[in-house]
Amino acid sequence: MQIFKVGGVVRDRLLGIPVTDVDRVVVGATTEEMLAQGFRPVGADFPVFLHPKTGEEYALARTERKSGRGYGGFTFHASPDVTLEEDLIRRDLTINAMAEDDQQNLTDPYHGQRDLEARILRHVSPAFAEDPLRVLRVARFAARYASLGFTVAPETLELMRQLSESGELQALTAERSWKEISRALMEDQPQVFIQVLRDCGALKELMPEVDALFGVPQPEVHHPEIDTGLHTLSVLEQSALHKQPLTVRWACLLHDLGKGLTPEEEWPRHIAHEHTGLKLIKAVNERFKAPKDCQELALLVGKYHTHCHRALELKASTLLELLQSFDVYRRPQRFEEFIGACEMDARGRKGLEQRSYPQADYLRGAAQAAREVAVQPLLEKGFKGPELGEALKRERLKALKAYKDEASA
Ligand code: CTP
């Protein structure tokens, strides 16, 4: 048997990028031989094994043929007569279809190295279409390598368009899609992921609510970029520049969905978009089974982002309601993420990226003032149960009034 490193490890070594996980392909071996050498099989369906000592992945060279819709619709052919070239041709991109042996001798039948140098993401063969997840993968690689100058080859974008139009993306499971989406959002240029999905028509299939924002105008005084879709891309871009966590990036992507529902005659104003957007945010959250913290923050940011922008004008009672809705007493981190997302929203506007955002510290101070109200004195006065809750609220309101007065003095 012959063993080669394949895929990301070869690509990233040639790019000079640190390599995290190493995949290997085994040519000329049978399952029985692998088991006899102590390799442990992974799952029942794939001819993939873990090394007995290192735990790294070794896959038997295989060909794949699609036999039906969705990811289940595959038949595999793995046998000792499958060549390295046959294994590589079924892979997604030329830059991912290179292999090397232990001496770093490169096998590159589909010109991955040439495309690496030309900074092009190009599919290897029509077999690309056998896994529609690859549409998301290409968009994710475009986001990851955008700063190196990579773009998607026109013929690959065309194939991605055909796959999107065929309805195949609907067959992807929430789990597989979320894995790609969440990884793409954590790249340095997550806005490129959304842009590429839009360019090939996949955004309309996966997140029509986000796609609908393109072409929707906003008032130029607040939004010099005008277009809501472009604004959303800028907010995402800011979220990466400011190294925000996944929860914040997800909330940034979904914060303005309500604007896609505004009747045209009301443009460019979007009255109550915070409220109308909630059902859309919920639908996207559930479609991809986003983790609970992402779902929660997206809904809260959708509902309250305008409150944050107007923080300095809010009455003490409204401030209190906001803090109560966030349960800032027990969930300080979530409130901090909310402020982060709103700040990205404020900066994700053309020419306003460097603006100051005093609302952030103002709200942090308000939360602190409310948190400092002590429970003990109220307990000593004999308050308990719901009355204690009411008394706490009154004291917090007092504290917020004092905080407001001091801030405006
Ligand atoms: N691959 C593919 N189609 C997929 C998934 C994977 O062709 N839907 C192939 C590619 O050759 C890829 C390799 O399997 O390079 C390993 O896949 P994976 O570990 O998911 O990705 P990497 O390319 O290693 O990239 P990353 O750095 O994102 O892990």
Image (spheres, rainbow, N blue to C red):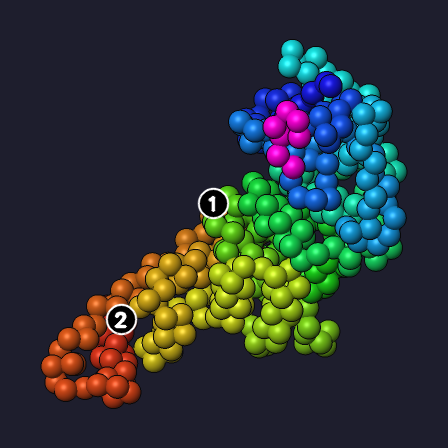
Percent across and percent down for residue 157 are 81, 42
Location of the C terminus by quadrant is bottom left
Q: Helix, strand or loop at disc 1? A: loop
Task: Give the SS element for disc 2.
Answer: helix
The image quadrant of residue 84 is: top right
Q: In this view, does 317 lie above or below 367?
A: below
In the rendered view, would you say 134 is above or below 274? above
Image coordinates of residue 267 in percent, x first then y, are 68, 72
- Viewer-proximal residue among 279 and 137: 137
Q: What residue type is labelled 2?
A: Ala
- Left or right of 245 on screen, residue 373: left
Circle on res. 224: none
Does the magenta-highlighted stretch encompass residue 278? no
- Which badge, 2 or 1, comes first in the chain's sequence? 1
- Report the residue at 13% width, 78% height from top: 377
The magenta region covers 35-41
Of 274 and 164, nearer the camera is 164
Which of the 4 image quarters holds residue 145? top right
**Residue 392 drawn above or below residue 116:** below
Residue under circle 2? 370
Point out residue 291 in the picture as x, y percentages from the top left corner. Answer: 54, 59
Q: Is residue 238 left or right of residue 404?
A: right
Mark 2 crowdedness (10 Å alpha carbons): few <14, some 14-19, many ≥20: many
Query: Which residue appears at 68% of the width and 39% of the height?
Result: 142
Image quadrant in which you'd find residue 212: bottom right
Q: What residue type is labelled 1?
A: Lys
Residue 104 in sight from this viewpoint: yes
Q: Is residue 148 visible?
A: no
- Is residue 362 positioned above or below 233 on the image? below
Where is residue 279? Give x, y as percent.
62, 74
Mark identifier at residue 243: 1
